[in-house]
Image (tube, rainbow, N blue to C red):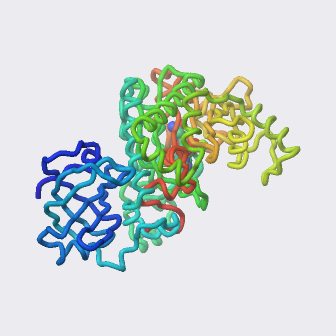
Amino acid sequence: MNLAQRLKTIIATAPGPEPVQAAGWLRSCRNSKSITFLDLYDGSCQAGLQVVAANGLDNYESEVKKLSTGCAIQVTGVLQESPAAGQAVELHATALEVVGWAHGASYPLQKKRHSMEFLRSIPHLRGRTNSMGAMMRIRNALTFGVHTFFQQRGFLQLHTPIITSSDCEGAGEMFTVTSLTSEQLAEQAKEDAPFNQDFFGQKVSLTVSGQLEAEAYALAMGPVYTFGPTFRAENSHTSRHLAEFWMVEPEIPFCDLDQDMDIAEEMLRFLVATLLDQCPAELEFFNRFVDKGLTQRLKGILANSFTRLTYSEAIAELQRAETVEKFAYPVTWGMDLQSEHEKFLAEQICKSPVIVRDYPTTIKPFYMRANDDDKTVAAMDILVPGIGEIIGGSQREERLDILTQRMAAQGVAPDEYEWYLDLRRFGSVPHAGFGLGFERLLLLTTGLTNIRDVIAFPRTPGQIS
Ligand code: 4AD
Ligand code: MG
């Protein structure tokens, strides 16, 4: 089989006599007396290619007329100017091979709008729809954009481990990894150190963040970033939590919180600009069918710098708003901001992405740097309209004595983190970083509202199909 050209290239080609070969799946078929019109797509672009197959083809009666949505075909033909609106060219077939039939009526996708709920029930086929196709191309462009952004700035990509013994976020939301059978586990559970006999001789889990390991290499190589799968056994049935998601985590030595916020903001703006440049058809699709304010919101991100507030200022703003707005969770200093508060800050108060900094020590993990006020840490979250938190970051505590005090206060066992403390013993420097939830970035850039729709195979509590 010759490798066919991708449709993205073909539809941008001028009409002419040279034979063109395309391959893909049918989105629809329309038979008239002696001609069949096929809407072909191959995943490379938002537009389809109209294939015109006439009764001169050898297999016209035997095969072409029997084609249906979902069939895979390979077609050779010539490009002619298309009389139809919305497409410059159409492919007039000189030979058409049916590569895979799609067993007629049982094919679950038809040329109509399917609900996102329905599509979630067929994750293995939904990639063939316009909406998932557009989302996946945006995901791909953003992935490349993340690497471009950091590589252009001299960051080194680090692959941090997926199996780990440290709970970076201290939230106890980790998936245990074991090679023991359930019988062995039950037997071990009766002992003092139940994971002694396990593969690693201790309890280990799937990572909730690559940050701690990234810190080790930032203090060895200069700026680094990780971009990998991240796991959280959070039992959250929300539209913005996954049990398995992807996180972008840069870590920068000789860097304070202000510089950290600058990099995060610059990165978001770079990624949005990349999309506007590389995925105009996909954005137009989402702007038209999913969220009419999408393009305008993305352009707004490019045009205006993000509002910056301290946590205390944010609380004061929210309390002022509370006189007219009813929140499910009343606003008090010291509370963790709930998603309703985060959204209200971004949507109503700032009307733009907003960076909130200096959160109360008590609600943040042990590694964040203590501020001089003894009440807050040098943390920052970026909150965006419609979603709330998309980035969480901080300056790290680089002072050994303060870090050990913080760990003790939060009940973090020091023996597990001796290596982390070594980083403060030997050549410690101020450093900072952040984590971008990649799927939340996709919610922001597609206008889709459920995080299950921005990853190919979502994993959520009770759901793994
Ligand atoms: O705020 P988080 O928990 O920060 C960290 O893990 C830090 N160690 C990052 C760092 O400084 N290197 O998570 C970072 C981001 C959140 O802002 C959110 O966008 C995303 O990760 N996130 C999730 N996305 C989907 N599903 C979940 N369950 C998520 N939990 C966090
Ligand atoms: Mg966070």
> Residue 154 sits in which quadrant?
top left
Q: Nearer the viewer, residue 294 or 171?
A: 294
Is residue 190 visible in this depiction of the protein? no
Ligand 2 quadrant assignment: top right
Q: Nearer the viewer, residue 26 or 62?
A: 62
Q: Is residue 270 left or right of residue 169?
A: left
Above or below, 253 against 381 in this view is above
Q: Nearer the viewer, residue 136 or 420?
A: 136
- The structure residue drawn at horizontal position 22% and vertical position 45%, both measured from the top left corner, is 15
Image location of residue 418, percent across then percent down:
48, 36
- The structure residue drawn at horizontal position 69% and vertical position 35%, both measured from the top left corner, is 359
> Residue 173 sits in which quadrant?
bottom right
Q: Is residue 65 left or right of residue 303?
A: left
- The structure residue drawn at horizontal position 46% and vertical position 55%, both measured from the top left corner, is 203
Above or below, 173 against 225 in this view is below
Q: How many numbered circles are shown?
A: 0
Image location of residue 155, percent across then percent down:
39, 27
Image location of residue 44, percent across then percent down:
31, 50
Q: Is residue 341 left or right of residue 231?
A: right
Q: Nearer the viewer, residue 300 or 427?
A: 300
Above or below, 335 against 184 in this view is above
- The structure residue drawn at horizontal position 40% and vertical position 29%, both measured from the top left corner, is 150
Image location of residue 2, percent across then percent down:
11, 54
Q: Quadrant of the C terminus?
A: bottom left
Q: Quadrant of the N terminus?
A: bottom left
Is residue 108 visible in this depiction of the protein? yes
